Image (cartoon, rainbow, N blue to C red):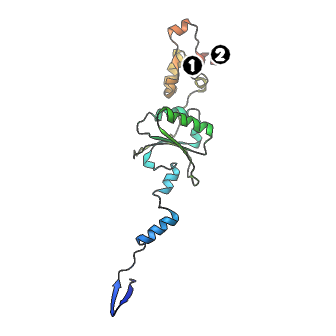
Amino acid sequence: MKLALMLRHDTNIKEIAPMTPKNELEKYVEYGVSGTPELKRDEKRHWLGEFRERVVFALTYDQIYRKEAVKIVEEKCKDNRVDKIIVSNKVNQTISGKYMDVAHTYHKDYKTIDLQEEKGEIALVLASQDAVNEKQVLLEKMPSIPEKFYQAKSKKICKAHMDELHKTAPLFVDDFEEISLFDKMLGVKCSVCNGDKK
């Protein structure tokens, strides 16, 4: 049943159109009291304040503490679509500091975010200013480096171990250098071989 207001003006009776659910004034008052409604609020809480379509890559809390995580984020930052690194403020400051360094190295914006009503397990997001609609933003299985290489990181290794690294952990090949003939003449030994002997 339509509700209409009747207004008496002199002897004429005029009908005013039914009220809309919320007129403009009511909306402004509501926005002033409770703030402007936020689009996709739950989605943004899950992705550390970003819309899902802007996320290029993300790490969970379990993944961000893995020793390989920084290297993976460095590789992902080479993607020109990545404009910023966002880290949850629940992440240990020593770890988040490493990602701040990565952001500085690759000229990306960096921020930590405190979402009191945070949803999910996302600890780090690499995001774009624009929608990228990346289908797979989470790694099901993180690439890992065998422990013997991790212990020898940034050291020279022999050809056999370099070949092994190419097969088992190609993401980390750039962290190592193959021993040259000149190195052999100087007596440089493979740090992985030496680690195996110990």
The quarter of the picture where residue 91 lies is: top right
In the depicted view, which residue is nearer to us: 77 or 185?
A: 77
User: In the image, residue 120 lies at what x, y percent?
Assistant: 56, 50
Question: In which quadrant is the C terminus drawn?
Answer: top right
Which residue appears at 65% of the width and 16% of the height?
197
Which residue appears at 59% of the width and 45% of the height?
89
Q: Is residue 99 above or below residue 155?
A: below
Residue at the farthest right position:
198
Amino acid at dot 1: Lys
Does residue 188 appear left or right of residue 171 in this picture?
right
Q: Residues within 10 Å of mark 1 (few under 14, many from 20)?
A: some
Mark 1 lies on residue: 155
Provide the secondary structure element on which disc 1 rests. loop
User: In the image, residue 49 lies at what x, y percent?
Assistant: 50, 50
Residue 73 circle label: none
Provide the secondary structure element on which disc 2 rests. helix
Question: In which quadrant is the N terminus drawn?
Answer: bottom left
Mark 2 lies on residue: 197
Which residue appears at 39% of the width and 75% of the height?
20
